[in-house]
Image (spheres, rainbow, N blue to C red):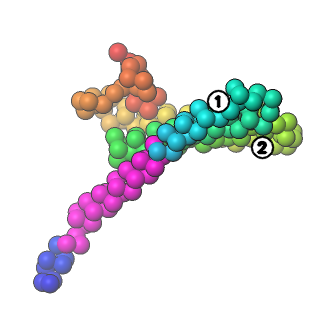
């Protein structure tokens, strides 16, 4: 192969394009696996619900049901961060912090329900939740400040929803609602 062709193949622009494609492919596979996990989890949840209705005397089944529901919430938060990547080409710290907060809350709820949460763990979880919440709030504030410094509110490309539920404003968007 000619040296100039080889140099052109490995120039910065081509490498960045290949890197972006690989990352998008890997994230697409991860998102597909998370989506499949959520679907399987919901089916399994309905199966556990039927068992719970047929045999309501076992308290362990209630705990398994609660754990499954909270785990599904975590998977949904993680999938939101990956979907956000496809919109912005970067992972948003707020989505990752949301997933971490949901995970910590899941652990707290499970341990409280099972009466296995000593006072020291409550303090540790409280400190962790405080730090994660501060991280999330500061991330939103920094994002809003960056948008103001870049020239105010920029219009979103057509086809993108504003806000998490299709209306209103999103804390990450920095744009007012309708």
**Place of residue 153 in the rendered image (x, y in percent of width and height, measured from the top left):** 32, 28
Location of residue 130 (image quadrant): top right
Viewer-closest of 106 and 58:
58
Look at 13% across and 79% down and name the residue there.
4
Q: Earlier in the sequence, mark 2 or mark 1?
A: 1
Q: Main secondary structure of the magenta part?
A: helix
Drawn side of residue 44 relative to residue 29, left or right: right
Look at 41% across and 47% down and name the residue there.
32
Viewer-closest of 36 and 123:
36
Real-space Cα separation, disc 2 to disc 1, in angstroms: 37 Å
Location of residue 51 (image quadrant): top right
Drawn side of residue 77 relative to residue 88, left or right: right
Asked whether residue 28 is in view, the answer is yes
Q: Which residue range is magenta in the image?
A: 9-35
Residue holding disc 2:
124
Q: Is residue 16 magenta?
A: yes
């Amino acid at each position: 192969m000619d040296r100039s062709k080889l140099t052109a193949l490995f120039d910065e622009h081509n490498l960045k394009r290949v890197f972006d494609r690989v990352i998008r492919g890997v994230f697409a596979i991860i998102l597909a696996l998370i989506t499949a996990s959520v679907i399987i989890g919901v089916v399994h949840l309905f199966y556990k619900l039927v068992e719970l209705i047929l045999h309501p005397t076992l308290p362990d089944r209630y705990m398994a049901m609660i754990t499954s529901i909270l785990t599904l919430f975590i998977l949904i938060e993680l999938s939101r961060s990956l979907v956000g990547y496809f919109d912005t080409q970067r992972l948003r710290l707020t989505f990752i912090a949301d997933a971490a907060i949901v995970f910590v809350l899941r652990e707290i709820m499970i341990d409280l329900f099972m009466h296995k949460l000593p006072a020291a763990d409550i303090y540790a979880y409280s400190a962790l939740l405080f730090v994660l919440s501060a991280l999330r709030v500061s991330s939103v504030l920094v994002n809003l400040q960056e948008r103001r410094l870049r020239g105010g509110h920029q219009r979103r490309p057509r086809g993108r929803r504003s806000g998490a539920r299709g209306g209103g404003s999103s804390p990450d968007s920095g744009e007012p609602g309708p």
